[in-house]
Amino acid sequence: MRWFFAVFFFLITWIPLHAAAEYDFVPFFNLLRQLENLNQQDGDSHAAQKDALLAKIPDSLDTKDDKMALLQAALNKDKSNVEAALEKSKNNPATTLRYQIQNAQIDAQILMFDWLKHTLELRKQTYTQEQIGSSIQSVLASLDALYIEQYEAALFDVPSAQKAALTQQLNRLRNEIASYHEVLNYLNANSALLGDSYLFDSLGLETFINKIDSLIPFSFWKFNFGKLIVCIAVLALFWGFRRILAVATVKIISYIFHYQESMDKQTIIIKNLVRPLSYILLFNGFDICWEIIYYPQNPPELVNKIFDILYIISTAWFIVTIIEYYGTIFLTTFSRKRYKNVRAEIVNLILKVLYSIVVIIAILAILARLGFNITTLVASLGIGGLAVALATKDILANFFASVMILFDNAFSQGDWISCNKIEGNVVEIGLRRTTIRTFDNALLFVPNSVFVNDAICNWNRRKVGRHIKMTIGLTYDATADKLQKCINDIIHMLENHKGIAKKSDYADASTLMTIKQELVSIDDYEGNKSTIEVYLDNFGDSTIDISISCFTTAISKAAWVETKQSILFEIMRIVQDNGLSFAFPSQSVYVENLPKDIQQLLLDSPNKKEV
């Protein structure tokens, strides 16, 4: 009889304790059980498995109504069994405590079931993130109210032979509640992952997709023809809105800050705003398409992270573009109205600081989305970075020099530069060194720190104008009228030559510099030169010098040489047409008195000449 009661009490104790295994047919509770098992294991070796498991939690929430009904029935049955067993064991403190702990476990599971049921109902409606957060906080508070401390105090009244088993059972309860906390906190921090499926249903897209799929049966992976049509429609809709949003942004900002830009400036701004807005809308469209493809499940967490990073990059680009244009207009207008003596360089510096702030915030946001602890990262850079910096001083100097080169945009790949007796075409800008191909066809590897403290001459940073400078020498038999006409003819020839730069060649350039024209010299910044100078320069020993200075429209060496040759031929024709001659180095010697014997010899010569 004693063995019978022992087996009986073992069964009624063991069955409620392991009844949770019956709930594994619901994906959400199955994942909860896996997380509890991982949390029971010591060490951090299972951190990656835990992260992967947490990432699957949002997908596991979608549960059919029939499974929810079965789960509710199982929970109610277990609750009734434990309460009945608890009523029968009032005279045994150890057994009473065992059933109390089991009852708390089932209460925690019922709380999670009620939250899951409420969340599924909430997602069928129009809800807010605040509602999701409020629901999660309510469950967390109820879990904290399960009086674990009360059960710990009751352990002192239990015989020592049974205390170890009850302590182990209480630890499992703690682990279960801690796992529930971990899941709920994760969902609260990633509440955006809980939505969209039922919004998808409320729009009637599921019916539309199923109807198209029945007419044109096509299926590949999670894809079918109905989803394909919806995805194309979404992308077309978002792509069509890009210019509308750009125009609306310009109009709203202009209205708020009372800007009255010209139509030309508005066109430039809209054109440049369309590019980042296009990427934002395109990424958003593809994000929605992924949700459509994975429906009725949510896309993997990795996909959400990728799109979040793309959103951060494109949004930062959009903000930088806004600052680039309207920040320039605002600071220029403000400084001109309030502080007339403010230098343009200060305004430029403020704009660059704003650009840097936006870029830094974007980088930190990306690191945070990737799971890095920003506070810890900054602290580690402060402590460990000092030792690393001292050990790798030259490497870090070259690295930061490469960052400065990229941000300063001093030169790009393919540019012809010269710096500190180094000259050639830039092949590649690396993190430590820059590769240059010299004109002798040698490959030169230059540490980036070389370019930081020395002057860099970039021959490619010019849009219109490569210099032609020459001096022509004419003979002294030229008259003033002929020289003036020759100069005028050369000027006329240069002004009408198709290879010589004129102001009209770049007057209509539509760039950001049209807005920054009050801060910098536009032509000098962009490399536009069109000056034509022809003038009488000097009276030399044997020549009358005319100086010629002009700029070609082309900047490549081949085109420059061809234009220069054409100019030289034209100058030769002009000099010849004006009856002038090119002088060559010569010297005239005048003898004031000759010796008498030489004078007599000249007089007696057959060809007499007057001396």
Image: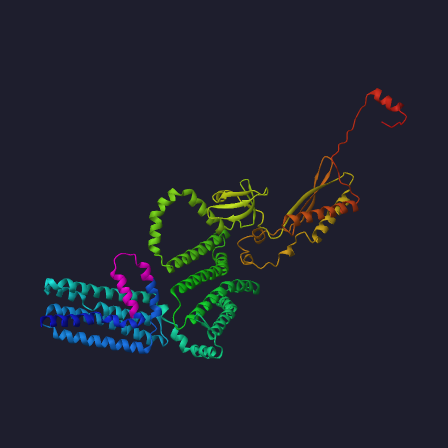
Residue 76 is left or right of residue 483, and the answer is: left
* Residue 76 versus residue 303 in the image, above or below: below
Q: Is residue 292 visible?
A: yes
As rendered, which of 2 and 530 lies closer to the eye? Answer: 2
x 50%, y 60%: residue: 325
x 34%, y 66%: residue: 56
Residue 533, percent from left and from top:
67, 47
Q: Quadrant of the C terminus?
A: top right
- Judged from this view, the residue extending furthest toward the right is 606
Q: Quadrant of the N terminus?
A: bottom left
- Quarter of the rendering containing residue 504: bottom right
Residue 422 is left or right of residue 547, and the answer is: left
Residue stretch in magenta: 29-51
- Quarter of the rendering containing residue 422: top right
Residue 47 is inside the magenta segment: yes
Identify the image's colour scheme: rainbow, by chain, secondary structure or one colour: rainbow
Q: Is residue 258 visible?
A: no
Magenta stretch: dominant SS?
helix
Residue 319, percent from left and from top:
46, 61
Residue 606, percent from left and from top:
90, 26
As rendered, which of 28 and 181 lies closer to the eye? Answer: 28
* Residue 521 versus residue 134 in the image, above or below: above
x 75%, y 46%: residue: 486
x 24%, y 66%: residue: 176
Residue 280, percent from left and from top:
47, 65
Residue 607 is inside the magenta segment: no
Q: Tell how many labels.
A: 0
Residue 421 is left or right of residue 364, and the answer is: right
